[in-house]
Amino acid sequence: MGSKSSFFVMIIAIAVLALTSAALASYLFIVQGTPAKSTDNTSIAEKAEIPKEEDLVKIPLYDGKRVFNLKTNGSDKNSLIQVNVTLKCFKTLKENKKVVVAEKVAAHSEEIQELIVRFFLTKTIDDVKNVEFMDNAKETLTKQINDLLNEGIEHPETIVYKVIFSEWIFQ
């Protein structure tokens, strides 16, 4: 008789677990709803898309290398960084093929150069010594320059693909 009662208790326990699992699953699907969709219209594949080299143009920002002051970190010695900055841009815009990107960048070159000066004025020598900082600087400046070039445009798009530092010397 003992084995029949333990068998019956085990069946009841399994039934309770099954009903609990079903209730939890329906709670997740019904009450929680569907996951929120991203407001960004670009898919992951589009973000990761690497353009062809013939679709890009390199635009040097300066005639040769430039020296920038860095933020002092308490010492009396001024710190400097010497860089050569080139913008790798798309040749044409996706929305308006008539716009020549090189001309648009040239029209904003002084503002872009000011962005770069301001960027380095907020960084210390300890910042620029870090190898990962160069990658961070490229990403930050690319975003800031694209924001500048897209000011007043209803549908902003990526104009500058990346910022290239062909020289990076600091002291």
Image: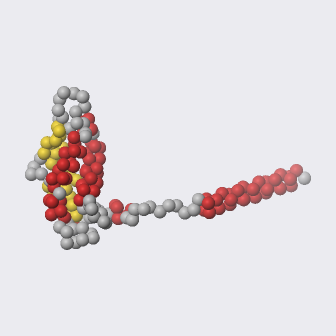
Name the one closer to the observer, 9 or 43.
Answer: 43
Q: Is residue 1 visible?
A: yes
Farthest residue, direction right: 1
Q: In which quarter of the image is the C terminus?
A: top left
Say which quarter of the image contains residue 44.
bottom left
Query: In percent of the image, x 19 and y 27: which residue is there?
Result: 76
Query: In percent of the image, x 27 and y 53: which residue is there?
Result: 144
Farthest residue, direction front: 152
Residue 166's spot in the image, x, y percent?
Answer: 17, 49
Q: In this view, does 155 lie to the left or right of 39?
A: left
Say which quarter of the image contains residue 43.
bottom left
Query: In percent of the image, x 22 and y 27: which residue is there?
Result: 75
Q: Is residue 18 left or right of residue 103?
A: right
The image's colour scheme reads secondary structure
Farthest residue, direction left: 63
Q: Can residue 157 be seen in this view?
A: no
Q: Is residue 107 left or right of residue 96?
A: left
Say which quarter of the image contains residue 67.
top left
Residue 51's spot in the image, x, y percent?
Answer: 26, 64
Query: In percent of the image, x 27 and y 70: which residue is there?
Result: 95
Give the total of numbered labels: 0
Name the one closer to the observer, 85 or 110.
Answer: 110
Residue 147's spot in the image, x, y percent?
Answer: 27, 56
